[in-house]
Image (spheres, grey):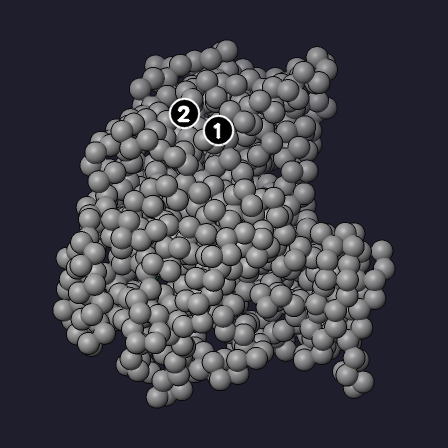
């Protein structure tokens, strides 16, 4: 059983506290700090605006519950706020002048789950008679898809509705509002900036000859959000209030300078707490009023706010179905008090220095430079830059920022100890939300984790592993009850409480998705393949993979000489099928993974034999009448189908069962499919197609998709929009750019496989390749200048470039320099240090 993050983190904090000398823990900010200049924050990679958002809009949940609508009720929040986060706690900063608004989120604040009634919750699975499953399969083998589909609809729907009650929804904590009494009409020089390189936001402006600057960051090492409000030429009078759609049980004034808010989620009893502390540097006073629930600061030119938030959620990999508190851990009030008490002993500068060091230890690993020698236009606010980009202006700087922002978002929304990034990462501004802001397993959560491996953020992958581990136990019931199968699986939608069943809906095109579990498990293999951590594979990874491969094996139906995943659907359209290409492709992948893993661990020979024989007989990929990779077992694809899902290309990307280098027929078919599907789509779909085109080595077409993603699928604050805001496209876009420079899914490090001709003189440093190699690639004139490959784990390193190949044995720490002479047909790899 896993301990909750904050108790783990808390121990670390307390241990380090003993080392801080008394003088340093006075809570003062040291020397009188000068007010920061926005230019320093705009420099480098930043997202910024020069107009404030309105102070008026707040409490959007009172306007409507927008779970069913693609339009977020707070358009400014969705396209103009700036996100900060530490993987558990998130804030989106509106930067309004008269009343600052910051939306506060805690990743585990969810409705639903066993707290709403254990019996009803865990009765999520219906029991399907194995004879019924057999009849469905036989009907499909005879070609009667309609009857089979009706039976799947009736039998395989779960019992829990897709709503906020029992399945639950990710929900916001609330909004912190700071009334500043500043006259908005008198504002000049306004800037609202998120500096991605430094992981800090700044809001600065002048009003009535007084200069104001506010800074915001969210620290992982100290588990705390920190704001600093400064003024020059006048003093600040601030009144902080908290508005929330959640139930507040109690507000307590603590230590004269902070307020503790305690509340609960009505439908499942989840407890939450938030504490806000203010301290002044130099002059000024802080007052708290528990009755009016406000904290006020008077006559201060330098104010630091510390904010901690938590819930009583704890992860549980083996929940007792009789226990309504299976996911309930420690008292969040105790935790937030300790976080604030500890953080308040550190100066702002120290908190920021520790935050920055932690952030940079991840972020600085990768550096992208697109044609760095070229003349760059003078920096413009991001909304204006994006508007010009939408009008087809070139802007390689904006493209770099988009790539870096994807990594920023992952670092800010996915850190060890909490749940993984959900459909909106961690940032959400309503009671309920689109698709319950859940974990969506038919592309979305998987896409979130593509850049975690290839862009060298393995630490950010850890919450995803925990999430998948949490699905295994409950997923064994789902596997057994519906498919009479061994192993585990999960359906299309999951929550933080081990939900694995299909939902209570008869629309099986999206709701029937047993391949979701094996897809998740295939990423467990990928994590191993990047780390090559055999101990981890033995203890954690392999049991998940093996059990998933067993499930996928049992899902196969023998139809003549071939095995096929029957019944299956291609997400999220078409009829019930004898073997949708997507389902068979995922099965192939998990069998390949399980076989490789078992061989590495030298175990389970019997299983390996079984898996291999199934793998050898899976229904083959088929090429249809218009040259397309068939989506279903029959050649019924409509060449005019523009559907956003391209799951039937799973074997091309993210899978590895279609190798475009060697399977040219299948690669051509995949290309035809992509042409038919077109280059316009929703955000994440363009992000995926970018990756597909990269795997087909067509850098220019991939670049078209990237440009479309930026132009049509991106809000002014660079959040991906489906619409509404959905973060997967940010992550798919970032991962896709990495694939343009380097690919490693075939076991060979393929250099510049898909460099767009427009990026002829570009370079990327520090990508991660399978085998645990850090790869830096430098292009000149569209060709490989050289590459540097650092071997982290040692071992054989196979390298390819435009059909040339070489390999070299490495020791940990070796640096391999690679150059190519295309005329002589040589690729040279030299080991240095
Ligand atoms: C997938 C998509 C939908 C949406 C949802 C969250 O199922 O098909 O369009 O993005 O995830």
Place of residue 430 in the rendered image (x, y in percent of width and height, measured from the top left): 33, 41
Look at the numbered disc 2 and say if its residue's Cβ is closer than 8 Å to ligand 1.
no
Residue at the spot of label 1: 3
| Image quarter hosting the C terminus | bottom right
**Which numbered dot is residue 516?**
none
Seen from the viewer's position, the closer of residues 654 and 66 is 654
690 to the left or right of 130 = right
Q: CA distance from mark 1 to mark 2?
A: 8 Å
Seen from the viewer's position, the closer of residues 593 and 46 is 593
Residue 244, picture quadrant = top left
Q: Earlier in the sequence, mark 1 or mark 2?
A: 1
What residue sits 24% from the left and 37% below the top? Answer: 121
Place of residue 153 in the rendered image (x, y in percent of width and height, measured from the top left): 17, 59
What residue sits 47% from the left and 62% below the top? Answer: 609
Residue 674 in sight here:
yes
Tell me if label 1 and label 2 are in contact, CB under 8 Å. Answer: yes
| Image quarter hosting the N terminus | top left
Seen from the viewer's position, the closer of residues 764 and 286 is 764
Place of residue 123 in the rendered image (x, y in percent of width and height, measured from the top left): 22, 40
| Helix, strand or loop status at disc 1 | loop
Crowd rating for badge 2 (residues with CA inside 10 Å; few <14, some 14–19, many 20+): some
Residue at the spot of label 2: 329
For residue 9, above or below residue 36: above
For residue 54, above or below residue 258: below
| Helix, strand or loop status at disc 2 | loop
């Amino acid at each position: 059983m896993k301990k909750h993050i904050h108790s783990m983190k808390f121990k670390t904090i307390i241990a380090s506290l003993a080392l801080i000398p008394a003088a340093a823990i006075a809570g003062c900010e040291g020397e009188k700090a000068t007010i920061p200049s926005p230019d320093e924050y705009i420099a480098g990679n930043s997202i910024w605006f020069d107009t404030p958002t309105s102070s008026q809009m707040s409490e959007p949940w009172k306007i409507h519950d927008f779970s069913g609508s693609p339009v977020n009720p707070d358009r400014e929040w969705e396209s103009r706020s700036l996100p900060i986060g530490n993987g558990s706690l998130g804030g989106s900063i509106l930067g309004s002048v008269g009343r600052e608004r910051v939306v506060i989120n805690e990743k585990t604040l969810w409705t639903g789950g066993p707290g709403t009634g254990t019996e009803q919750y865990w009765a999520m699975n219906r029991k399907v008679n194995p004879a019924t499953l057999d009849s469905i399969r036989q009907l499909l083998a005879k070609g009667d898809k309609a009857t089979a589909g009706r039976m799947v609809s009736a039998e395989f729907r779960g019992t829990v509705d897709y709503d906020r009650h029992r399945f639950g929804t990710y929900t916001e904590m609330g909004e912190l509002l700071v009334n500043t009494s500043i006259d908005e009409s008198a504002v000049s020089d306004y800037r609202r900036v998120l500096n991605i390189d430094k992981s800090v936001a700044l809001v600065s402006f002048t009003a009535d000859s007084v200069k104001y600057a506010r800074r915001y960051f969210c620290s992982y090492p100290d588990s705390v959000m920190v704001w600093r409000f400064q003024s020059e030429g006048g003093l600040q009078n601030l009144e902080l209030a908290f508005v929330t759609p959640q139930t507040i049980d109690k507000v307590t004034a603590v230590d004269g300078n902070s307020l503790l808010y305690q509340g609960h989620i009505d439908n499942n009893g989840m407890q939450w707490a938030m504490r806000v502390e203010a301290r002044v540097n130099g002059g000024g006073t802080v007052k708290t009023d528990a009755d009016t629930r406000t904290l006020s600061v008077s006559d201060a030119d330098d104010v630091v706010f510390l904010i901690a938030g938590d819930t009583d959620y704890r992860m549980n990999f083996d929940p007792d179905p009789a226990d309504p508190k299976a996911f309930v851990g420690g008292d969040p009030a105790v935790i937030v008090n300790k976080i604030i008490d500890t953080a308040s002993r550190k100066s702002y500068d120290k908190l920021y220095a520790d935050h920055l060091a932690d952030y940079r230890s991840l972020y600085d690993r990768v550096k992208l430079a697109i044609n760095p020698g070229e003349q760059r236009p003078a920096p413009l606010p991001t909304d204006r830059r994006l508007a010009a980009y939408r009008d087809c202006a070139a802007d390689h700087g904006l493209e770099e920022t988009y790539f870096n922002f994807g990594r920023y978002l992952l670092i800010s929304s996915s850190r060890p100890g909490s749940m993984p990034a959900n459909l909106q990462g961690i940032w959400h501004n309503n009671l309920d939300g689109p698709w319950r802001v859940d974990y969506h397993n038919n592309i979305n959560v998987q896409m979130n984790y593509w850049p975690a491996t290839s862009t060298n953020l393995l630490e950010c992958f850890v919450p995803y592993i925990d999430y998948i581990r949490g699905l295994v136990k409950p997923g064994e019931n789902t596997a057994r009850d519906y498919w009479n199968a061994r192993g585990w699986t999960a359906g299309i939608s999951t929550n933080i409480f081990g939900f694995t069943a299909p939902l209570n809906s008869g629309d099986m095109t999206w709701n029937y998705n047993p391949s979701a579990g094996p897809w998740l498990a295939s990423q467990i293999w990928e994590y191993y393949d990047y780390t090559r951590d055999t101990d981890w594979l033995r203890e954690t990874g392999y049991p998940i993979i093996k059990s998933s491969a067993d499930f996928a094996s049992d899902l196969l139906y023998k139809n003549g000489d071939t095995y096929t995943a029957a019944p299956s659907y291609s997400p999220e359209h078409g009829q019930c099928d004898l073997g949708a290409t997507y389902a068979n492709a995922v099965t192939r992948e998990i069998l390949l993974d399980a076989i490789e893993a078992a061989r590495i661990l030298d175990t389970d020979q019997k299983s390996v034999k079984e898996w291999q024989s199934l793998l050898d007989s899976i229904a083959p990929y088929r090429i249809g009448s218009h040259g397309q990779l068939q989506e279903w077992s029959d050649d019924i694809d409509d060449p005019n189908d523009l559907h956003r899902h391209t799951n039937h290309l799973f074997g091309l990307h993210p899978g590895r069962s279609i190798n475009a280098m060697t399977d040219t027929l299948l690669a051509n078919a995949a290309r035809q499919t992509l042409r038919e599907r077109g280059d316009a789509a929703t955000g994440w779909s363009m992000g995926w197609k970018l990756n597909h085109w990269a795997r087909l080595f067509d850098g220019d077409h991939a670049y078209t998709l990237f440009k479309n993603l930026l132009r049509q699928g991106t809000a002014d604050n660079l959040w991906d929009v489906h619409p509404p805001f959905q973060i997967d496209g940010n992550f798919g876009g970032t991962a896709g750019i990495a694939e343009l420079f380097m690919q490693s899914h075939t076991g060979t490090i393929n250099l510049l496989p898909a460099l767009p001709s427009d990026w002829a003189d570009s370079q990327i440093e520090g990508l991660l390749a399978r085998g645990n190699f850090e790869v830096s690639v430098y292009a000149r004139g569209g060709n490989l200048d050289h590459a540097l490959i650092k071997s982290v784990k040692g071992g054989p390193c196979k390298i390819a470039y435009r059909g040339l190949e070489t390999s070299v044995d490495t020791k940990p720490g070796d640096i391999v320099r690679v150059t190519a002479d295309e005329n002589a047909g040589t690729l040279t790899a030299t080991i240095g240090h």
